[in-house]
Image (cartoon, rainbow, N blue to C red):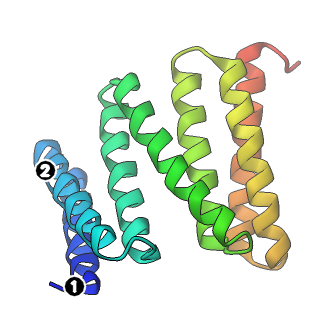
Amino acid sequence: MRPSDLVNYSRALKILGIVRSNQGRYQEAVTLYGLSSKKSGLAIDMESENGDAWFELAQAVYYLGELEFFAKQYDRSDKKWKYYLLISQKFTTKFPNDAKWLLEESFALNSLGSSALRQGRADAALRFFQQSVEMKRRVLGLDPTNLKYRYEWRDSRSWVISALEAKGNLP
């Protein structure tokens, strides 16, 4: 298979994983996300700078972490989401004005912040959420009229408020 075929295969497996997760068939979703990450990994082995393959790997890792988060397996979800963050940072460094990767990095930061908040670590959550707001500010700077970017920026700001509230810093 060519790298592009592996990426498409990975994407299809990820979408099936999302469907299975939405159906409450979590173990099947885990299997599909795992297969998705393997296929994108094979594409990366063939073309180490294949951004589409890295994106699909990041997505599969995110969704695996999400299932672990909902199962309250925070150590495992955090590990996945830290890897998701590293992948995103690799590409925001390489492409500092690419909204897709800037948003992915902010999503990883929000995920880690949500996990920290759920675990009662409001200070850590606040740092993650503030970093996410900064990433989304950069995205918004690329196109201030883009409604999706505006929504995403406001969403991260609401998470900052949640962390401040958890710290008892709101009236």
Query: Mark 1 or 2 closer to N-term?
Result: 1
Q: Quadrant of residue 6?
A: bottom left
Q: In this view, does 146 lie above or below 73?
A: below
Helix, strand, or loop for circle 1? Answer: helix
Q: In which quarter of the image is residue 150?
A: bottom right
Of 167 and 9, the residue lying toward us: 9
Neighbour tally class for label 2: few under 14, some 14-19, many 20 plus, Cα within 10 Å: some
The residue singled out by tag 2 in the image is 31
Q: What residue type is labelled 2?
A: Thr
1 sits left or right of 44 in the view: left
Residue 10, horizontal then vertical, whole percent = 24, 70
Of 152 and 97, the residue lying toward us: 97
82 sits left or right of 170 in the view: left
Helix, strand, or loop for circle 2? Answer: helix
Q: Is residue 104 visible?
A: no
| Point 25% across, 54% down: residue | 22
The residue singled out by tag 1 in the image is 5
